[in-house]
Amino acid sequence: MTSTFQNLPAEKQARILRAAGEEFALRGFENAKMSAIARAAGVSVGSLYKYFDHKQDMYLHVIRSSIAEMEQLLQILSHTDVDIIVKTERILREIQRSSRKNPLLMKLYAGTAAQNDPALAAWFAREIETSAARIYRQAIREAQQIGDIRPDIDADFIAFVLHSQFMMLQFSYACDYHTERLKIYAGEDIARRDDFVVEQMLKFLKNGLR
Amino acid sequence: MTSTFQNLPAEKQARILRAAGEEFALRGFENAKMSAIARAAGVSVGSLYKYFDHKQDMYLHVIRSSIAEMEQLLQILSHTDVDIIVKTERILREIQRSSRKNPLLMKLYAGTAAQNDPALAAWFAREIETSAARIYRQAIREAQQIGDIRPDIDADFIAFVLHSQFMMLQFSYACDYHTERLKIYAGEDIARRDDFVVEQMLKFLKNGLR
Amino acid sequence: MTSTFQNLPAEKQARILRAAGEEFALRGFENAKMSAIARAAGVSVGSLYKYFDHKQDMYLHVIRSSIAEMEQLLQILSHTDVDIIVKTERILREIQRSSRKNPLLMKLYAGTAAQNDPALAAWFAREIETSAARIYRQAIREAQQIGDIRPDIDADFIAFVLHSQFMMLQFSYACDYHTERLKIYAGEDIARRDDFVVEQMLKFLKNGLR
Amino acid sequence: MTSTFQNLPAEKQARILRAAGEEFALRGFENAKMSAIARAAGVSVGSLYKYFDHKQDMYLHVIRSSIAEMEQLLQILSHTDVDIIVKTERILREIQRSSRKNPLLMKLYAGTAAQNDPALAAWFAREIETSAARIYRQAIREAQQIGDIRPDIDADFIAFVLHSQFMMLQFSYACDYHTERLKIYAGEDIARRDDFVVEQMLKFLKNGLR
DNA sequence: AATGAATGAGCATTCATTCAT
DNA sequence: TATGAATGAATGCTCATTCAT
């Protein structure tokens, strides 16, 4: 990203990143076309290259700018004095709401996680996961301290497990393959049984954690 | 896939599918080059097009031929008279072994699940998940009947949860992004702490299920 | 063409030349596929290359074998003691009949005449036109001698004019572009007004010749 | 054709259409190479695809842009107060002049008329012939009204006959096959006997029409 | 002689990136 | 700074021709 981009009016920056995010989410990195992004953003291709060094650079910044949005979920975990199970339920319900409201974000995340270039993948992972991991860990440790989670499991690892489960659920509500997969496991009408999903998930996680 | 391909000596068929699988796994569908596959398989591009209608047709059959291999894991679940927890442990250890031995398979799976075309993604999901879903469900129902898993959770949904968890673990051992992610959550040396991973995972799942 | 082909049973030779003729007529030389010809003829591609040196060699022989058929029309001109106008009418009616019965022959002819390679085009022209030219000339000379055609026009050139006119009519009944062209000039229903065409053509030619 | 092409300086548009026209005329549609056209026109392949959707689209517009040039001949027919025979002579002489000056145009026309795709051929015919047909018809009707052409022949059909004859003559001066064919009928030196051709043609047509 | 699998040069088309205006 | 036309390398796919069986 260049300083030229940073000097742009915030609205224009947002417009460009949104257009790029949609294109990348919908078509995947390889199939995304710079010209399509330019058109959708209402700027010229030439300008895009004034703002970003190349396609990948743009992708990087789309991801970076999406991270805040992806981390919205974490706010729920940050609240103190709330039972971990209650937090879990809130997260589950928020996943159902937000994955449907903005599936593109999850598609973008899924596409990024499927990235094949090792160095790049590592960069993405650090960029995206570090903060989330810290918050998950923190929340679990606190829950352990007040006895809501049994002390004999490793907070760090269980944070990984918990986040994995949430991630898969998010994908299941937003990404084509995973949506179909969920239907195969839990029935064609699973998308209309949100309470059931929350209830079952909670039952499982509650015991797993306690 | 054409009959010409089916009439090929098994060794040659395998050679071609392996070369294609590697290329697709390593570079992803878009970046995979037919010419590279041909070279790696020791055949001409023209031949590849005698065997498969087009690149995507080839991908389809690489996936199809990989499914059997992916489902190897399921054999563990099929054994009767084995405690579900024991099965789970065996699966965890097998995941660690096989994901490292053949990470390409998991990369292929991850890439396929990140597929962006809705219709194609659905086709893939049905092709890949249907059989696995059935076996997971069956194993859990049996465990419920003999009291190894509590009866008040939905077998179908819990099959989804269990498989999701295993899937994420497989990705964590085989795919760049997920490997990094696991390290962020559980420490740089997590790859050398297989027993720890199994133990923690078991603790969590055991309680979750019982 | 090889001796192998000549030693084939006449039926097989005919079958191959017919299949090739159809393919060449329907798709044109460039778009004709050797494999399609092989399939249609019920032989293998390998065999085709045992019979002919290459695609063009095959085309050459398809044309050569079609010439006899194309020259069927000339028999009408060869009859002695028949008025040139009567001959003309017979030819016109035969054009209408044969162009519809076997439009492929005319398509082949049209495609050949559109040939762009100078040397090849010259070869084709000599091969196809020489005999016809002789017969046209001869018929016109005879008609001039008995006073059916006025003596002050050049027999050779008028033969060219006459044949040109017939050729265009043949194309008009058999080839897509020329069919449409005729309709544009003479109305959509011209194909159902054969007597009109003959009558008008005769009026014009009669005066032109006498 | 795209608006990008239309916005090009006229000189550049002409340069590209000329390069394309030459390539298509000389090699035929199938054998024409986009890269050769680009090179000849002094632009990149990429640009050609910015100007035209695909090869065939380019061909279409080459034809379309050639039509005006092809119709130059028709101006002769449009003059009023000129005897139809005089017009005919002028046309014959103009055919001799222009077919030699720009044989590519006629090659292009011949190649187009040999088109094998029915729908496309019909499109071409309408595009190319409609205007010419109208003018031929009009000229003949006028000549009939003032008694230069006898009234008992159908103006529309005779327009077709007349145009056919002119077309064949044009081909004979410009296209390999037809040039050879003319020589076979009228002698090797026919190309040097322009007056003879005009004279003979006129004799024939004069009587045919009157 | 017959087969049809194998070959690979060849070409249309795309799209990230550049650059003149 | 903004534009969008220009570039050309890159790649999927075809098909005439060859050749081992």
Image: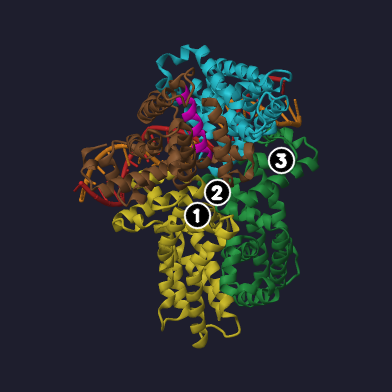
Chain colours: A green, B yellow, C brown, D cyan, E red, F orange
Q: Nearer the viewer, mark 3 or mark 1?
A: 3
Between disc 3 and disc 2, whose residue precedes? 3
Of D3 and A11, the residue lying toward us: D3
The residue indicated by pointer 2 is A121
Q: Is residue C183 magenta?
A: no
Mark linked to residue A105: none
The residue that appears at 58% across and 26% down in the rendered structure is D208
Percent position (x, y) of residue B112? 52, 57
The residue indicated by pointer 3 is A39
Type of the residue with mark 2: Ala
**Disc 2, SS:** helix
Chain letter of the residue carrying label 1:
B
The residue indicated by pointer 1 is B175
Chain letter of the residue carrying label 3:
A
Of D80 and B187, the residue lying toward us: D80
Q: Give the distance between the C-alpha atoms of the residues marked 3 and 1, in whole angstroms.
A: 34 Å
| Labels 3 and 1 share a subunit | no
Q: Give the distance between the C-alpha atoms of the residues marked 1 and 2, in whole angstroms.
A: 9 Å
| Tag 1–tag 2 contact (CB < 8 Å) | yes
- Main SS of the magenta part reads helix
| Tag 3–tag 1 contact (CB < 8 Å) | no
Is residue B187 in view from this perspective?
yes
Q: Give the distance between the C-alpha atoms of the residues marked 3 and 2, in whole angstroms.
A: 29 Å
Percent position (x, y) of residue B136? 50, 75
Of D64 and B198, the residue lying toward us: D64
Residue A143 location, quadrant: bottom right
**Span colored in magenta:** C158-172
**Disc 1, SS:** loop
